[in-house]
Amino acid sequence: MTKRTTDRFTVEEATEIYGLDNWGNHYLNIDPEGHLRVKPHNTPGRGADLLKIVQDLEKRGVSTPVLLRFPQLLDGQVQELCGAFQRAIKEFKYQGIYRPVFPIKVNHTRRVVEGLLEAGWDHGLGIECGSRPEILAALALETPPESLLICNGYKDQAYLSTALIGTQMGRNVVVVLEKPFELDTVLALKEANGDVPLLGIRVKLQSKGSGLWEKSGGVTSKFGLSTRQLLDTVHRIREAGLVDKVALLHFHIGSQVTEIRKIKNAVREAARVYAKLNKLGLKVRYIDVGGGLGIDYDGSKTSSDASVNYGVEEYANDVVYSIQEVCNEEHVPTPTIVSESGRALTAYHSVLIADVRGVIKGTSPLWERQEEDDEVPQVVRDLEDVLRGISVKNYRENYHDAQEYRDQMLSMFNLGLIDLEDRARVEALYWEIAQRAVRFSHTAKFQADEFQELEGRLYDKYICNFSVFQSIPDNWALDQLFPIIPIHRLNERPTERATLADITCDSDGEVDKFVDLKDIKEALEVHSLVENEKYYLGFLLIGAYQDTMGDVHNLFGRVHEAEVLVDPEGTTVVRNVRKGDKAQNSLSLFGFTEQKLVPDVEHMLQERVDNGLMSAEKAAYLLDEYRESLQSYTYLK
Ligand SMILES: *Cc1c(COP(=O)(O)O)cnc(C)c1O
């Protein structure tokens, strides 16, 4: 542990290093004390001080890791999206309206869905479901009267019956047909109930998305009807007398579409299909352009996987304009435009804060040998020579020599010819040479792969009290990048560069890629740890998908949560604290219920008491400890 640095460093520099002005959508700032603040749009003051919130929560027994949700950021996103569509509609004199729909799979958290419904009430925000359990949730929520309840996903009889409950409750339920056989299920429903929900048709477009979720679109995607299937389905719908039920045309080319061109192409293609269906006598009223509106996680405004080369404004303009253009050419009425933007509405609203528990050093300190000590093996002397001789001209060869000597040492060690002391000397020398070689490799025009990789191994690892698998699963599964930034000490120069390790016993539980404006960073700028002082990192933009995709690897469960508001006076209000899982909760998911665990352990302890191996008091004490441990948070205390 080293001391704080005192050289001059401004919060402007910190803002630049971490790029929050690029990816924060104006929700973030750093105050003069170097604390990260979240400031909802149209609120007075500097916004909520994350460090202060965490410290206050800690006093109330709610320790990190903790997830902070900002309902006002959900509202900000809803207003931004709906505002953009309203402006586009006005600008292009589009004859029709826009209806947002929230795909509930993006975040099932009840408070999040309710927050969105409240924010989008005046815009008639509806819900999209992809499974029967999701419909069950949607049916119980209060939604704006004119809003849509769109039902996608695999549909059996039970699914449709549940959807029909919604229709009969007076909701605008639209069941989207995406497989030819789903129509049979609908016809069976009609037979049995005399009524069916409104119908939509999901088409498989030639147009594809781009980015990590590209395969959701295109002709090989697992969703949607091909052109032949579409025509057959239309024919059968007509025969069944259900033409009037067809209300919506749907497509979805994948999430986080990185290029606006892909979206424009898909919308134009779908609008053509809409026009042709109209001419076939199907009075479709809605075009649903699905999800895909992306988030600029790295702030680069490019088509890299962590970014998007467009903004909400451009997206809305292109969707509205493209539909308008095709409808004008085809002389068909313009439909209500629906989008199922989930990521764009929720990504910003939550921040995970984790404390750093320690450092795994990337290198070991060089060991000083006394000159008169001539007992050392030749291999140590050879490495010392390599170290002495390394220069910008020969660093590559010298590094290769060092590798060879290290291997030689290992063979000797395995033969019993070298003791641990000398092994440690060789390792320290080797890492020192590696470090110098990396430094010299930066002088080359192009750093060789070998040294790039080596550099990655030389970074310190900061151990963070959280689980990648629970809190940012897409980082593990898809290498998705999320911005990460210390929430304090941002008025102090971050002197270290480190990668992050979580506390699971899984080597995949690491973060070693970080957002950067121009590239991907291999290490994050962090501060050196100060003894007896906590150091907190914030994981941002994790409000979309991560909440439900997270799992309980190593039985690390759900984290503590709290909602944070900034009131009209600019004061921060923390409410609805929800405690995370106790060990007992994670265990019971897998059949280890408290009701059985405690008596079982008690029984084993009693046996030791009976056999005279333990006192009854000791056994009672241990059982209490065990019970208490079951009741505690799954993360490090
Ligand atoms: C997942 C999904 C969405 C959400 O997409 P985002 O890119 O998060 O907006 C929308 N529609 C359908 C059909 C989906 O499956």
Image (cartoon, rainbow, N blue to C red):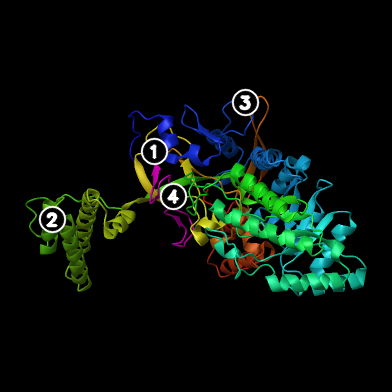
- Tell us which disc is closer to us: 2 or 4: 4
Q: Residue 225, located in which quarter of the rendered image?
A: bottom right
Q: Are marks 3 and 2 in contact (CB under 8 Å)?
A: no
Residue 204 within the segment the image draws in magenta? no
Q: Earlier in the sequence, mark 2 or mark 4?
A: 2
Residues tagged 1 and 3 counted as in contact (Cβ below 8 A): no
Q: Residues within 10 Å of mark 3 (few under 14, many from 20)?
A: some
Segment colored magenta: 500-526
- Measured Cα–Cα span from mark 4 to mark 3: 32 Å
Whether residue 508 is in magenta: the answer is yes
Q: Which residue is mark 2?
A: 384
Q: Which residue in the protein does label 3 denote?
A: 44
The residue mark sitting in front, 1 or 3, is 3
Q: CA distance from mark 3 to mark 2?
A: 62 Å
State the residue position of label 4: 514
Q: Position of residue 123 (x, y in %)?
A: 76, 42
Q: Earlier in the sequence, mark 2 or mark 1?
A: 2
Q: Secondary structure at mark 2?
A: helix
Nearer to us of marks 3 and 2 is: 3
Q: Secondary structure at mark 4?
A: strand
The amino acid pointed to by label 4 is Phe
Q: Residues within 10 Å of mark 4 (few under 14, many from 20)?
A: many
Q: Can see residue 615?
A: no
What residue appears at the point 48 percent right and 48 percent down from the top-left corner?
302
Q: CA distance from mark 1 to mark 3?
A: 34 Å
- The disc at residue 238 is none
Q: Residue type at mark 3?
A: Pro
| Residue plotted at (41% across, 39% down) | 17
Label 1 belongs to which residue? 530
Give the percent coordinates (x, y) of residue 110. Answer: 72, 50
Q: Could you tell me which secondary element the residue under label 3 belongs to?
A: loop
Disc 1 residue type (three-letter): Val
